[in-house]
Amino acid sequence: MGAAGHARRSCLAVPGSNPKMLGKAQGLPADQVFLDLEDAVAPLAKPGARKNIVAALRDGDWAGKARVVRVNDLTTQWTYRDVLEIVEGAGEFLDAIMLPKVQEPAHVQWLDLTLTQLEKALGLPVGGIGIEAQIENAKGLVNVDAIAAASPRVETIIFGPADFMASINMRSLAVGALHPGYPGDPYHYILMRILMAARTYDLQAIDGPYLQIRDIDGFREVAKRSAALGFDGKWVLHPDQIEAANQVYSPDQGDYDHAELILDAYEYWTSEAGGKRGAVMLGDEMIDEASRKMALVIAAKGRAAGL
Ligand code: GLV
Ligand code: MG
């Protein structure tokens, strides 16, 4: 339980109301699945979806994927029962709960305390179930640092572009895509804000969905922007997006090879100099301790991706 160090390049959305997709998702090569009780599930279908999800977690073979359930947000009447039924029914088969539309640290603290109660009552390890916090409106973004710090259970901060765009009155219907009326990246500030909070508290930063599911080139373009900033992964809504996400959020082979070369060269030349040199040459490139740290980030991601 818990998936703090788990790769999350591709986070697959699976509606809890669709047993066929709950079955199919198990065999797909996504790093994470999140079984949804929120916006992909109609109000009348929510009780049935809870039962489907419990059965899929208990009986399914999720093949090493991080297993996450997205509950409804705390302004609804559904949240407490979502958490109760999922954790009572399948707490030992669950890595994290995703909480959407988080606006303040108290929302995370409510979930933390509720999970602690359930874990104690069920004899599960206390603190074992992680929390993923979705930032989907202005208040959530303004409070993102406190939200990231609100509980040691928090593992990821996730950008929710559709709800976010609606909540700030952004004049666009193209979720995740660049805005034709704006000469820049309208998401840059939001992504950076989330990334800084995530890195401050050693959490993963996850980009949200791209709704044009047939447009894989468009998906890649959007994903490349957040990957370039340092995001760890992105939501995928369709099996076709999975491979693209796994590729975009892994370093490419050239960068990976270069990173390993920097690490080797830096270690070799600095030890050769008996610890007396801080900066050394690798071909025409000067490398120092900061280069080593940058190389380590890329090398670690590449090694995890099996490059
Ligand atoms: C995801 O939940 C979004 O609102 O984009
Ligand atoms: Mg949303």
Image (cartoon, rainbow, N blue to C red):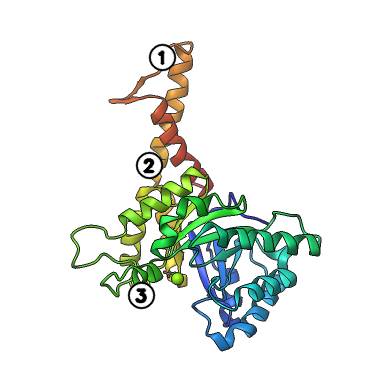
Can I make out residue 223 in this image?
Answer: yes
Q: Using the numbered discs, state the Cα–Cα distance from disc 2 to disc 3 in whole angstroms.
A: 29 Å
Depth check: give the residue in front, 96 or 197: 197
Q: Position of residue 126 (x, y in %)?
A: 74, 54
Judged left or right of residue 42, residue 172 is left
Q: Position of residue 247 (x, y in %)?
A: 42, 56
Q: Residues within 10 Å of mark 1 (few under 14, many from 20)?
A: few
Q: Using the numbered discs, state the Cα–Cα distance from disc 3 to disc 1 in whole angstroms.
A: 53 Å
Q: Using the numbered discs, state the Cα–Cα distance from disc 2 to disc 1 in whole angstroms.
A: 25 Å
The numbered mark at residue 277 is: 1
Judged left or right of residue 5, residue 214 is left
Inspect the image, locate mark 3, and give the three-letter code of the amino acid beneath it. Arg
Secondary element at tag 2: helix
The N terminus appears in which quarter of the rendering? bottom right
The numbered mark at residue 255 is: 2
Secondary element at tag 3: loop
Depth check: give the residue in front, 214 or 293: 293
Q: Badge 3 is on which residue?
A: 214
